[in-house]
Image: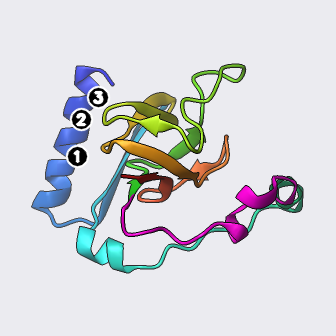
Amino acid sequence: MDQDEAARVRALGEIAAEFDLDAIRVRTGETEIEIVRRDPAQYAAQPVTYAMPAPAAAGALAAAGPSDAAAAPAPGANVRRVTAPVIGVFYRSASPGADPYVEVGQRVNAGETLCILEAMKLMNEITSDYSGVVSRILCENGELVTLGQELFWIEA
């Protein structure tokens, strides 16, 4: 994001706060910026609903075996959740043929890149705020994720 875009985003955030708006969206040519304000306490209290995968995706998940979502254990007390800071498309690697940034069972350090979220044609590297072992990857490569959706579980 260049300085002009960052300044526009900041200005829109200030306008949203000044007029107590829940959301504001501005389109200039091909560029569209949307700011959505949420009360963190209210957002955390709401249940998150996920769409069921398409039949082809469900078959791929079933073929994955014991690591599939239905067989996975509930998170322990020492699990830290990494959530999506933006709405975007989840990518596990820098390019289609590259190795994923992280795998389940891999040790990561705070600041290490976990994935990329593509939002508005910008590639945003998502880094870990925690050091620990990746215990779950909750999204599929190419999946559209929502703001606050859990992406990874990291056990401290």
Give SS at disc 3.
helix
Task: Name, please, the residue furthest toward the left.
Answer: 18
Classify 99 as above or below 19: above
Residue beneath the point at 41% across and 47% down: 86
Label 1 crowd bin: few (<14), some (14–19), many (20+), radius 10 Å: some
Where does the image place residue 65, in percent across and percent down from the top left?
Answer: 81, 57
Q: Residue 151: x percent and y percent?
A: 50, 52
Separation of disc 1 and disc 3 at Cα?
Answer: 11 Å
Residue annotated with mark 2: 8
Left or right? Give the position of 53 relative to 50: right
Closer to us: 15 or 138: 138
Type of the residue with mark 1: Leu
Amino acid on which disc 3 is placed: Glu
Bounds of the magenta segment: 62-79
Residue topped by disc 1: 12
Instruction: State the residue at coordinates (20%, 49%).
Output: 13
Q: Quadrant of residue 20?
A: bottom left
Name the residue type under label 2: Arg
Q: Position of residue 43 (x, y in %)?
A: 34, 72
| 113 up-or-down from 146: above or below | above
* Residue 30 placement (x, y as % from top left): 49, 30
**Which residue lies at the image location 63% right of the left edge and 21% below the top edge?**
95
